[in-house]
Image (cartoon, coloured by chain):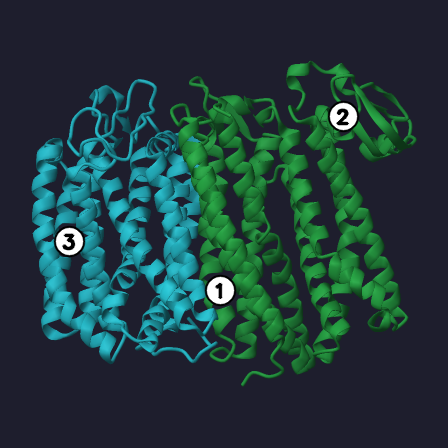
């Protein structure tokens, strides 16, 4: 615990994980709000703009916490990861700077108009503000994913004589194949979070028998979007992401699956506990040959195991990586199943009266959050022991003179601030839920 | 190209100080100029739609520094570690206090956020001013390009000073007074009724205080870093900047005298912009000065990235910067005129 690196990693992991609980809903809801406003404009029915108004209020509270918890992440590059910043700033500074210029200015300029401007603006103007927030938040997501993609699979750079990384091809860096795949996977996952939240609120109001028009609209919107996007998050985007890992980070793939021995017709472990010291999975339940298919598209492909690679290149935390991957994939499957059932009942016109399914939709709200958090844990634990894959080790990236006493202090400070933010968020969101939708603009 | 980027980064940071400066000032003064809930909502209504965009200048400026001079960012941010986090925590609590205050109609809830808003608005300019003080005074950079400083030692200068010493605290106080005066002009321009009257009454007094602090800070800077005055004759841009801030100062007093507060507010913006530009011109090309040995200084030349990165950055910067200015113009135009407190549930 006296090791500064431990605290640097804990602080970044903790603050990034906490932060991302908010933007995933922001980005998902941004699309939902645009759709609702568009339907409202097209049909002229007030129920759509009423629903949008309710979600904009949730969006506003959630966005504020997302903004302020995002600020520390930008600062941590310099404060805690100085050697990484010094070496790679010329590259990742491009995307971080562009995020400010092209995404944050756009979002911050139109946020106030979206939240408070419905009466000041024409319906089309207000729709425009919603589109601006959607574009801004999704652009911001791209610049961050492109930054992360450089750390996962560096492209478009060269190492200069002084050891720093210099940009050689802007487009190779910005349009990194890893960034495109991860972006699609991540943004679709954000819509899954948004649609599960919308469906849950619809289910809650239906179960309570209040706000019938809005309950029905939200249930319907959440279920349809939830079904489409929870399928898309697995196929093709999750599948594509798996193939990128298999191609560029074969060690990570082996660690995610707890696979020690190489061989063809590799099975997919559904359940089991990895024992890293004796190189095996205990109590495994496997589906034969499916891992080969997921990784390379044929059942007969050879999937290499960890023992084929030098141990100093293994991710340090194989257990957590393994469980993160299995939790993400397991919950993803469960979510598809739930939405398929809800979608079927919706189609048959029986969803609003199927109380067990409504209860399941209500209680499933944490699932997309857990799955998304686990997904990012797979990406980040899987990248270890590298900070920039194959280029810079994590241990070599931290600030040289910041000691454990500094970082422990700030990590604990964040823990305190985040407790306060969590309570505020729950309190304010709870009030909005209790208040419910307003049926008309006054 | 390095020189150009030195100026781009400086301009972004100077714009940040001018823009966030007036909403810091509003936060510092609101307990004094706005007494009732209605009046406080008037102040929040004036800065509410703007503060978030103002802070983006910091992020965009920081991003520009990151891409062009990563060594400076890495060294400075890690060296000022604890002070950086005090800045970040203040920014976080301040943002939340502006956004969440109006959500609940309750006296205690609102008193709590008013106090949080005021305290964080005071802390930020003091800390950011002290950061500027550190850049002007120098930090104990050694041959590795890094340094580490405690928040304070004995408040004296020397080769191993603390982040806060008498000089940097003086610059912090100068910054606090200046953004308060800047904010008073903004409120006098954008509000009417009691808030307007109180801000109008306070502004000339604050500006006299700015003059006193300005003289003290300039004299202290000349003592702490004599090279700055030494560079002055050979820095034509510094003369332009000095003309800008003197003209700004003149406009402030003309505007105050004629009760034309937009004019005075523009003047105070020019004053801050000019003062920061003059400082940048006098320290150029040094970005982080070493108190140990001038050979260890981080400069625009030895801390920059390669030419391809700088040229690439310039292309999108030239696209993005006018866009950002366009948003600012749009926002000020959309929210033009005097601000009245919004109805409950309808605004900040």
Residue with the mark numbered 3: B245
In the rendered structure, the answer to whether residue A292 lies left or right of residue A240 reads: right
In the rendered structure, the answer to whether residue A75 lies left or right of residue B203 reads: right
Residue A111 bears which disc, if any?
1
Closer to viewer: mark 1 or mark 3: 1
- Residue A319 position, x and y percent, is 71, 29
Chain drawn green in the picture: A
Whether labels 1 and 2 share one chain: yes
The residue positioned 17% from the left and 48% from the top of the image is B241
Closer to viewer: mark 1 or mark 2: 2
- The mark nearer the N terminus, 1 or 2, is 1
- Residue A17 position, x and y percent, is 58, 43
Pinpoint the chain carrying mark 1.
A
Q: Where B1 sits versus A441, above or below?
A: above
In the rendered structure, the answer to whether residue A378 lies left or right of residue A98 reads: right
Pinpoint the chain carrying mark 3.
B
Chain B appears what colour? cyan
- The 10 Å Cα crowd at callout 2, few under 14, some 14 to 19, many 20 or more, is many
Q: Where A225 sits versus B83, above or below?
A: below
Compute the Cα span from label 1 to label 3: 33 Å
Give the quadrant of residue A304.
top right
The residue positioned 37% from the left and 32% from the top of the image is B78
């Amino acid at each position: 615990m006296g090791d500064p690196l431990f605290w640097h990693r804990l602080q970044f992991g903790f603050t990034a994980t906490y932060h991302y609980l908010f933007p995933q809903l922001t980005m998902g809801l941004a699309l939902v709000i645009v759709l609702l406003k568009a339907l409202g404009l097209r049909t002229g029915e007030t129920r759509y703009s009423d629903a949008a108004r309710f979600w904009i209020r949730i969006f506003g509270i959630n966005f504020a916490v997302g903004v302020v918890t995002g600020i520390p992440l930008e600062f941590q590059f310099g404060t805690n990861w100085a050697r990484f910043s010094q070496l790679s700033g010329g590259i990742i500074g491009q995307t971080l700077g562009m995020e400010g210029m092209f995404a944050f200015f756009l979002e911050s300029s139109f946020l106030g108009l979206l939240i408070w401007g419905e009466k000041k603006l024409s319906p089309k103007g207000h729709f425009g503000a919603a589109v601006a927030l959607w574009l801004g938040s999704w652009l911001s997501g791209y610049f961050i994913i492109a930054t992360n993609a450089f750390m996962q699979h560096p492209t478009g750079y060269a190492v200069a004589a002084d050891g720093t990384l210099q940009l050689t091809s802007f487009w190779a860096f910005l349009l990194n194949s890893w960034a495109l795949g991860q972006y699609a996977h991540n943004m679709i996952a954000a819509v899954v979070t948004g649609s599960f939240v919308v469906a849950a609120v619809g289910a809650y109001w239906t179960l309570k028998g209040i706000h019938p028009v809005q309950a029905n609209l939200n249930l319907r919107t959440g279920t349809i979007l939830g079904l489409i996007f929870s399928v898309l998050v697995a196929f093709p985007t999750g599948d594509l992401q798996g193939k990128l890992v298999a191609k560029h980070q074969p060690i990570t793939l082996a660690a995610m699956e707890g696979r020690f021995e190489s061989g063809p017709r590799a099975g997919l472990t559904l359940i089991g506990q990895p024992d890293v010291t004796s190189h095996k999975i205990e109590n495994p339940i496997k589906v034969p040959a499916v891992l080969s298919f997921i990784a390379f598209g044929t059942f007969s492909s050879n999937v290499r195991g960890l023992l084929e690679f030098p141990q100093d290149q293994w991710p340090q935390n194989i257990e957590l990586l393994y469980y993160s991957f299995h939790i993400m994939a397991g919950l993803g499957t469960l979510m598809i199943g739930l939405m398929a059932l809800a979608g079927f009942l919706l189609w048959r016109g029986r969803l609003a009266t199927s109380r067990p399914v409504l209860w399941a939709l209500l209680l499933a709200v944490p699932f997309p959050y857990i799955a998304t958090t686990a997904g990012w844990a797979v990406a980040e634990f899987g990248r270890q022991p590298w900070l920039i894959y194959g280029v810079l080790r994590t241990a070599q990236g931290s600030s040289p003179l910041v000691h454990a006493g500094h970082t422990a202090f700030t990590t604990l400070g964040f823990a305190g601030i985040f407790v306060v933010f969590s309570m505020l968020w729950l309190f304010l969101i709870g009030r909005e839920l209790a208040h419910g939708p307003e049926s008309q603009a006054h | 190209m390095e020189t150009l980027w030195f100026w781009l980064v400086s301009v972004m940071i100077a714009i940040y100080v001018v823009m966030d400066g007036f909403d810091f000032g509003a936060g510092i003064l609101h307990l004094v100029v706005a007494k009732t809930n209605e009046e406080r909502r008037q102040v929040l209504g004036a800065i509410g739609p703007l503060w978030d965009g103002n802070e983006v200048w910091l992020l965009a400026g920081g991003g520009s520094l990151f891409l062009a001079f990563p060594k400076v960012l890495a060294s400075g941010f890690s060296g000022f570690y604890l002070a950086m986090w005090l800045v970040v925590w203040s920014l976080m609590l301040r943002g939340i206090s502006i956004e969440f205050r109006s959500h609940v109609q309750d006296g205690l809830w609102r008193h709590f956020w008013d106090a949080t808003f005021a305290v964080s608005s005071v802390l930020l300019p003091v800390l950011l001013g002290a950061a500027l003080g550190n850049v002007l005074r120098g930090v104990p950079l050694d041959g590795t390009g890094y340094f580490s400083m405690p928040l304070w030692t004995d408040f004296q200068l020397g080769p191993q000073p603390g982040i806060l010493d008498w000089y940097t605290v003086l610059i912090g106080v100068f910054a606090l007074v200046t953004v308060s005066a800047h904010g008073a002009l903004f409120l006098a321009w954008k509000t009417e009724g009691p808030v307007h009257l109180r801000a109008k009454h306070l502004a000339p007094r604050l500006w006299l205080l700015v003059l006193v602090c300005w003289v003290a800070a300039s004299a202290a800077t000349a003592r702490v870093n004599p090279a700055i005055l030494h560079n002055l004759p050979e820095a034509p841009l510094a003369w332009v900047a000095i003309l800008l801030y003197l003209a700004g100062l003149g406009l402030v007093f003309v505007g105050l005298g004629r009760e034309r507060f937009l004019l005075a507010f523009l003047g105070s913006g020019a004053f801050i912009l000019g003062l920061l530009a003059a400082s940048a011109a006098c320290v150029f090309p040094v970005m982080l000065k070493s108190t140990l040995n001038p050979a260890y200084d981080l400069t625009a030349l030895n801390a920059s990235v390669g030419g391809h990165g700088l040229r690439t950055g310039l292309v999108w910067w030239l696209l993005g910067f006018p866009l950002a200015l366009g948003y600012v113009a749009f926002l000020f135009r959309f929210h033009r005129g005097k601000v009245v407190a919004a109805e409950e549930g309808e605004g900040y």
